[in-house]
Amino acid sequence: MIDKHQIASNILLAPYNLTELGVGKIISDIAGNGATDYADLYFQYARSESWQLDQGCVKNGSFSIEKGVGMRAVVGEKTAFAYSDDMGMEALLEASSKVKSIGRQGQDKSIKLPRYDLHSVDFYQPVDPIQSIETSKKISLLNLADNLARAKDPRVKEVTASISGSYEVVLVVRPDGALVPDVRPMVRMSVTVIVEQNGRRESASSGGGGRTNYLMFTSDQVAEYVNEAVRQACVNLEAEDAPAGTMEVVLGPGWPGVLLHEAVGHGLEGDFNRKGTSTFSGRIGEQVASGLCTVVDNGTMDGRRGSLNVDDEGNPTQENVLIEKGVLKGYMQDSLNARLMGVPVTGNARRESFAYLPMPRMTNTYMLAGDSDPEEVVASVKDGIYAVNFGGGQVDITSGKFVFSANEAYRVENGKILYPVRGATLIGNGPEVMQKISMVGNDLALDTGVGVCGKDGQSVPVGVGQPTLKVEALTVGGVQL
Amino acid sequence: MSVASGDLDRQLLLDAAQAALSKATKLGASQAEVSLSSSIGASVGVRMGELETIEHNRDKSVSLSVYFGHKTGSASTCDLSISAVQEAVAAACAIASSTGHDEALGLADAELMANDVSDMGLDYQWDRSVDEMREAALVCEAAAIDLDQRIKNSEGANYSSHRGLEVYANSHGFCGDYYSTTHGYSASVIAVDGDEMHRDYWYSSERNPVNLESLESVGEMAANRALKKLGSRKISTGEYPVIFDASVSSSLIGHFLSAIRGGLLYKKASFLSDKLGEKVFSEHVNIVENPRLFGALNSTCFDDEGVGTPERRDIIKDGVLDGYILGSYTARKMSMQSTANSGGVRNVRVSNGGKSSQQLLSEMGTGFLVTDLIGSGISMLTADYSRGASGFWVENGEIQFPVEEVTIAGKLNEMFHGIQEIAADSLGRGNTHCGSILLDKLTIAGD
């Protein structure tokens, strides 16, 4: 068993002549005796690489190293933040003098930290994916994707593929001086094809990844990504204009769970609710979705893209029930918002890197399976669409309006799937749409591991998932009247 | 003490650039290029009349590419020490030993390098302390909250000031650098009426702080925009004329500019592939790029490959596509010349027909005025366009009521041809200046 403490100390402290005692002194100096309500240091080292194939050739690869330390002091609702990519003691002291200035004077009480126990098991291993296979093997995986795609269908005209991996080591120094390390691997592969038929061009992408090493990309796995991308692109060659208007919508399992991410996920983040700016603010205990809906955010799933052993404040991740049988149960919290709202932390504090402040964020967000047979769900549609795959989405958490864009969908009438329809954006109001979920399938699936969530200019990897589900009425933004 | 001053270690960056290039030569690279940046600044946020966050920013980064003939590798790091930069060069060289051969790869041609690196008027240091920034942000937010009692909540106001240094050098012997500053503030507030809540924001951001709108006007604009959304409702599904308000019209021009990027064109991944010289907009539309406009947001003498920029370049002339957006790689792929657009297109200006916003509403008569867009349902390959929208329903040239939770959909190529009129009401901010755009028709999905 590789010791994460040892890795963090070797990579983040020793090269800069820092000791646990030394960083402990800095944090106690910032935290002061009651001068602040919270303070932390976040040391981070990340190396990452990516390789891209285009027009039959792996033309470029890139390698990157990022490292630095972020420092924060919190008093009431006020936060002071500074960071440095220089991790020497002098730079740390300069940064700490900037954040200390926010502290209050003449107090004398120590910070009360919530009690926590770190997980006894890890949800991913402290491995370096970049070292997991030879460079030549990474290149052959991309070439394999290219060959498979072109062999799969003569209509394939362009193939681009990429593979990337990162190895990240973090060390959170908590206000009581406790050091919480984590070692976070991540890999991702994606394949995009352009197909052409009678002068018409369509494209589609597929891929996957997670917190593991490159060995997950077996030949079979690469073939699965390729087949999916080619299949979806070819379906779209036959697609007709999507309908416009409000109608029944069935969403397929897996990645369409981006619905939940947008319709409820963001609106349940603690910062918005503490400030009362979310459409879900002050509604704990209320029925905010149909009784068929139970939605969780779970950072503790093995090897998942959105999983974390500890969040970016060093608190253990959890499986948090957000909505149970339609009733709003709780929000996702970081330490600042949990303290101000008087509730426990939930292990949802995340930051893009040391150079950004942490915020409450999602991990893996999904709806639990229901009882319905997925085929029966589709068969129940009188007039609507069946959307199988999606691109991205976006939400205005204050008004509750959210959108997400289908890139594989079918027209359904009287229970029959008629023909594929072109990409269209779907729009709705989060709480209203959740109330209109009338059937939930028994086929819960998580996405394949490609999700990126953006908030306030910070990107973090996330997972989404859901079973097949039916919304009685949702506005479909096609062009066909 | 000013939060965004100092020379940002200019000599360190220049030394690191030369160290990278000489290391690349030493490791056998036939060509190499390096970009470095360094920035400093601060951002102060207030909310509901209280200080909320003080963020001090200090960033450095270097990214480089090496070429061994027509093979390449890239690396980047935020550590600008000579040893770290040399390690990055070695990593890039190791990558280049594994990548494939592509004739189009390499530096931009030596004869295209900029032969002047004059000041473009982007650097205006501003002596602001954190305390002054906080006070100013409080004024901005208060102007929003005090405007109307229905402004009951706030996401706060933010005030920021940054100075940055960019350096680019390559093994042709080109080395250029320039400073730029960005100063500005924003406010985001929430209008409440019963159960209904609407948030909106406004901002002002400039290289030169004397050009900023007043703190009060930014706050009031944010509040007014949020207030006007109260009472929003859906409209019926149908086909209507649409105006893209000046606050969102540049997004439409942005989709056009994305579709003529070389990176899509050489793979025929754009609906505008092979359309050079063809009419792609209605004939009264003219779009130009002014890369050397003194003091404009993105002015520069040289692009991200050192290629000298022109004073002015037509992109759309009387509706006809007059030029693509190419760097040296994509230009070679298409047997064309670089248009000095590595890193993007700079200071885009769209022509207008001289009419006011109100005249445009009158011309539309009845239709949908779009003021906000959400989502990304746009395909550069197929030209399919479908986005969430909110705004106002207009009859007889007069705004009737606010509209929300609808989508607008069409085909980008038809939308460009369907531009009836562009008003002279550009906000004059951002990279693309464009007034409100009246389109003949789009499909709106609602009730």
Image (spheres, coloured by chain):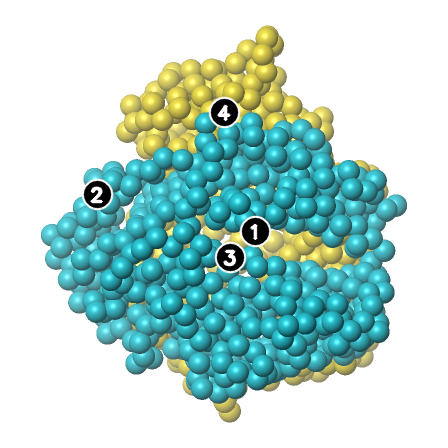
SS at badge 1: strand
In this figure, which residue is indicated by the disc labeled 4?
A: A99
Provide the chain ID for the residue under circle 4.
Answer: A
Please determine if labels 2 and 1 lie on a single subunit: no
Numbered disc 3: what chain?
A
Q: Which mark is residue A450?
A: 3
Q: Looking at the image, is mark 1 or mark 4 nearer the viewer?
A: 4
How packed mark 4 is, by other alpha carbons closer than 10 Å (few <14, some 14-19, many 20 or more), is: many
On the image, numbered disc 2 is attached to which residue?
Answer: B15
Dot 2 surroundings within 10 Å: few (below 14), some, or many (20 or more)?
Answer: some
A357 over B85 or under it: above or below:
above
Residue type pointed to by label 1? Cys
Whether the residues at callouts 1 and 4 have beta carbons within 8 Å, the answer is no
Residue sitting farthest toward the right: B194
Q: CA distance from mark 3 to mark 4?
A: 36 Å
Position of residue A261 measured from the top left corner of the image (x, y, whole percent): 65, 52
Task: Name the quarter where the C terminus of chain B is drawn.
Answer: bottom right
Residue on which disc 1 sits = A453
- Secondary element at tag 3: loop
Residue B428 in sight: yes
Q: CA distance from mark 2 to mark 4?
A: 31 Å
> Judging from the image, what is the letter of the chain drawn in yellow?
A
Q: CA distance from mark 3 to mark 1?
A: 10 Å
Residue B47 appears in which quarter of the rendering? top right
Name the residue located 55 percent from the left edge and 22 percent from the top edge: A102
Question: Chain B shown in which color?
Answer: cyan
Q: CA distance from mark 2 to mark 1?
A: 38 Å
Badge 3: residue crowd in 10 Å (few <14, some 14–19, many ≥20):
many
